[in-house]
Amino acid sequence: MNILSAPRSILLLISLLAVPQTVSAQASRDLMARFNKLAQEGDAVHQRDGAQSAIDFYERALLDPDFEDFGRIHMRMALIHQDDRRFPEAAYHFLACMRDDRVDKVDREFICRGGYEEVTAPLLLRDLPERAQVFILEPQLFSGPFTSGDRLPMGRIEVTVESSGHRPRKSEFMLDGPLEWEARLGLPLRQGQLVPDGFVADGQPEDKDDFVAEGPEPASASGASHWPLYLTAGVGAGVVAAGIGIGLDNQTKFEETRATQAAGTCAPVPGQLPCNQSITDANNRAQWADVMWISGTAMVTTAVVLWLLSDDNPQPEETQ
């Protein structure tokens, strides 16, 4: 290469490299010009029709491909929600603003991050067992696994504590500032057989003819006094079995929902995660299963006690 031509080559290279930057800078200026016009319209809607109308206006603006997930629009929405003390929504939009590099770094740091810290507070989990996990149910915008020390929007918090061998335990509390919360496990899952085999058949005559031969009056009295106990025990055993069956089936569905949520394959629905409804339904079914097996056990136990105390049980004859 001729030395005299070197400067011209360098200039040509610099000009080629500068073209994308020039185009990018122009596109950024055009985007900001459109946003400034949009912001003026949004302010007019806010003053004329109120906060919710302004939120709806900006949500429609986010559907524009040029404004898709634009941090400055999220900033505007966050400030409106913050003024209305809707802290979960405000925190959500402040986070979206913080993630967008198209927003000036100073604005991201002082407005978006500062606003996020104003509407959230850290939550520290205390006495959480090693293998246990806490999941956020409410607010839904922040639902999912939670790590001790992370920040959550201030207000009502609904969580569930889950651990192998225990039923999920749902709790609610208010987060008004930095909080240290004790995580408690749910009831242990019952294992083994609740009702001995053949209990319902105990005390029933094996041979009807032999039973009748002992005399009509004892047979009638014994049958009349014992049959309600047998019926109670049988119904109780059935309720216990149904409760256990529902609990086991519910546990399987619950674990499948958690796996879906952990994999991030829940269908996206604005404002909520569909997996949360499945988790709430699972918790409700678990409570019903608890009620069923506890009620059934009480029925069986009552029948056993009354049967043992029954005066119709055969007594040993005294020897004269």
Image (spheres, rainbow, N blue to C red):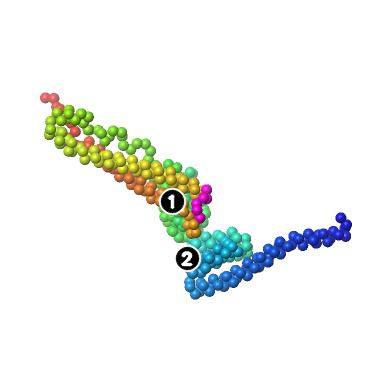
Query: Which quarter shows the C terminus?
Result: top left
- Going by the numbered disc 1, the residue's amino acid type is Ser
Q: Which mark is residue 248?
A: none
- Residue drawn at x 40%, y 43% is 249
Q: Which residues are magenta?
A: 263-268
Expressed as whole percent of the image width and height from the top left, the position of residue 123 reads 49, 55
Circle 2 crowding by C-alpha within 10 Å: few under 14, some 14–19, many from 20: some
- Residue drawn at x 45%, y 60% is 155
Kindly identify which residue carries mark 2. 85
- Residue drawn at x 45%, y 42% is 164
With respect to residue 224, does 179 lie above or below? below
Expressed as whole percent of the image width and height from the top left, the position of residue 163 reads 45, 44
Kindly identify which residue carries mark 1. 278
For this view, does 252 lie left or right of residue 18?
left
Circle 1 crowding by C-alpha within 10 Å: few under 14, some 14–19, many from 20: some
Q: Quadrant of residue 43?
A: bottom right
